Image (cartoon, grey):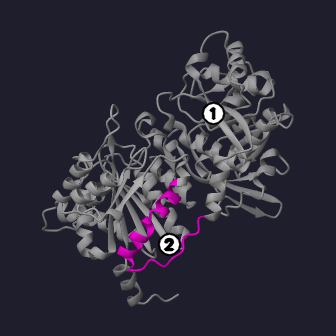
Amino acid sequence: MTIHLGQILYFFESMKIICVTWWVMSWLWKWITAASIWRLFVSAWYTVTMMKLDPYLQIDAWTMSPYEHGETFVTKDWFETDLDLWHYERFIDKDLDRQSSVTTWQIYQSVITKERAWDYLWQTVQVIPHVTDEIKDRIKKISDWHDLTIVEIGWTVWDIEWPHFLETMRQLRWDIGKQNICFVHVVPILQVTTSWEMKTKAIQHSVVKLREVWVHADILVCRTPQKAEDSVLQKIANFCDLPQDHIIQACDEKSIYSVPEAFHKQWMMQLIEDQLFGWTNKVVDLDNRNKRVQSLLHPAKTTTIAIAWKYTSLDDSYISVVEALRHAGSYCDSKTNIVWMDTASFEWEDQENDIKEFLQKNNIDGIIVPWWFWTRWVEWKINIARYARVHKIPYLGICLWLQIAVIWHARFECWLADAHSTECTTKTTHPVITIMQDQQDLQKLWWTMRLWHYPAHILTWTKVHILYNAPYFVHSSYKTQDDDTMIINERHRHRYEVNPFYHQTLQKNWLTLSWMSPDGKLVEYIEYSDHPFFVATQAHPELQSRLSTPHPLFVGLVQASLEK
């Protein structure tokens, strides 16, 4: 295909950007706002992409605490980011890659690398223009062949960490023309709890802060628990120099998936269209989306799932698992009640009775045990896998929990009494879980991490095979059919594997290795054929669940829990 210079210039000159900023608090719906805007434009058949600009100095989110940023998200090209990219993916049903996550470290590293290569020969390397030009180059690159690019700037105005990002967006307004960039500013309407009076001073100050760097907000998204009176909106409009219809109210909704519809009713997309494209003629089709949202809000059945967790101080530590359960519940027309099972409460000797009492007291129908690293509470983890196996409780184990299930099976079904993982102890005589032989000489932890969208072959007519063949799971990038073999691609983030030396021993004692890597060396899924639903995976299926396409493993768990 021949691409003419005129075509290249057209796409450069017609680059359209929505820049989302925010103020005061981190829970202001900034990502919901950006994702909802994306959802509206995608539903009107625009081609849209996004970029998250994060001021922190890490390369990526690998070493970040789940208590501060929630769980780490892995893109299909093995880049580790914070949760915002996952929120975008599940809102708009599109896979993102490393280009969408930019940190200050990446920008500075690129600039210093170019300086060392003499790209800036005889120049004084500075934030302006060199750092800002590097950011602009990345935005322009990701914007190619898209109608619209949404850029979210992390952290609040005016944090000390992010002036270079905001300065870049200010420059872009003149580089591409102010008619081609729209600034959406997310702010809170604060309420005095004693009188419930709505206060707007924080909004006024945030808009002033933006103006100090010559950025004028085109649209304000005001986060408020309930609708503000017209007088409040008029006050905001007067002090912020905006038409009143450019103030969008982000009120509490029964579900975050209802937010795009709420924004649409306030003509948000039409405001942006009018500014960036000069028309408001495109029709937004949210019908299918709204049907699934209604199923989520008004289910006919109910089931209760226990999540055994480690990071107990922040629900967002496992938010992708929670949302994957909700997606599956929506498909099964069921409300999924979630009960948190704090692992620290089951460290004592009488673990089995404690687990039994907990499950009965909370009417638990199924158990899911999400990821975590390191060795704390290992014996309790093994005990809960045993309890679910013996008492026929639907069980889904993710990442480390496949290894835990294998250790239990090796001990009690294969009679390998001290079977263990070398992550926990090097003294075991039966290392059923270990670092692969070709990685044992690597010194740096990151080099031994298995991160990617890995393919694997599923054993036919297993529970996993039947679930992945279901009609609701149609995403072509996840599965392909090669003759009689189904090939699945799932995202991974782990280091230790099931030891190939023990594969035959495990299988001879009735553990089904239902999903293997193409070379047969790595165990990806295990299951028990005589159990209603006992499945564990080395992958992270929760990262690929969407409201429109729930992940089959979570659907299998919810279905088995309903039948129980």
How far from the left and from the top, in percent, is residue 216? 24, 63
The residue segment tinted magenta is: 259-286
Residue receiving disc 2? 47
How far from the left and from the top, in percent, is residue 149? 41, 68
Crowding near the residue tagged with mark 2, few <14, some 14–19, many ≥20 C-alpha atoms within 10 Å: some
> How far separated are the C-alphas under marks 2 and 1?
36 Å
Image height of 95 relative to 309, above or below: below
Q: Nearer the viewer, residue 447 or 357?
A: 357
Residue receiving disc 1? 338
How far from the left and from the top, in percent, is residue 203? 27, 50
Crowding near the residue tagged with mark 1, few <14, some 14–19, many ≥20 C-alpha atoms within 10 Å: some
Tell me the amino acid under the disc marked 1: Ile
In the rendered structure, which disc, 2 or 1, sits on the residue that comes first in sequence? 2
Tell me the amino acid under the disc marked 2: Thr
Numbered badge on residue 178: none
Q: Nearer the viewer, mark 2 or mark 1?
A: 1
Q: What is the secondary structure assignment of the residue under circle 2?
A: loop
